Image (cartoon, rainbow, N blue to C red):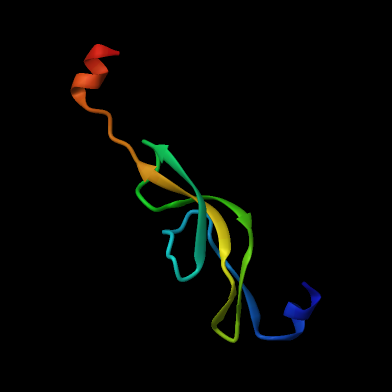
Amino acid sequence: MLACKSTACEKIEARGRISTPNFHQAVMMIESEDFEDNKVIEEFETGYLLNGRLLKPAKVSVSKRVVKSVEAADRG
C-alpha cells in the first residue's frame, strides 16, 4: 500500500491482542486451553486506519477459552 506511506494511514496491530469488533472482523473462532477468551490468534488480512478512523478491519481468528472439567479428565 504505497498510498499509506504518504498519508496518515496506519496498520492495525492484531495478533496477540484482545479482539474488538471496532477493529477486527472475526472470520474463525478456535477453541483453546492455551489462550484467553477473545484473543486474536492469527491475522488473515491486515486492517488499516486512516486519520484515526477505520478504513478496513483486520480479518482474524479469535480464541474461545475451553476449560477441561475434572470429570472429563477422569473419563478420558
> Considering the image in quadrants, where does the C terminus appear?
top left
> In the picture shown, does residue 75 fall above or below 43?
above
Extreme-left residue of the structure: 71
Q: Residue at x 57, y 63 (%)?
A: 58
Q: Is residue 35 left or right of residue 15?
A: left
Q: Nearer the viewer, residue 28 or 37?
A: 28
Q: Is residue 18 left or right of residue 73?
A: right
Q: Quadrant of the N terminus?
A: bottom right
Q: Residue at x 40, y 37 (%)?
A: 32
Count of marks overlaid on the render:
0
Residue furthest to the top: 75
Expressed as whole percent of the image width and height from the top left, the position of residue 55 reads 61, 77
Residue at 46% in and 71% down: 22
Q: Residue at x 22, y 14 (%)?
A: 74
In the picture provided, is 12 more to the left or to the right than 4?
A: left
Q: Position of residue 70 (x, y in %)?
A: 19, 23
Depth check: give the residue in front, 20 or 11.
20
Which quadrant holds residue 2? Answer: bottom right
Vertical placement of residue 22 versus 61, above or below: below
- Residue 34 in the image: state x and y as whole percent: 39, 38
Please state the horizontal and vertical placement of residue 59, each as a whole percent of the image.
57, 58
- Residue found at the far front of this picture: 27
Position of 70 relative to 9 (above/below): above
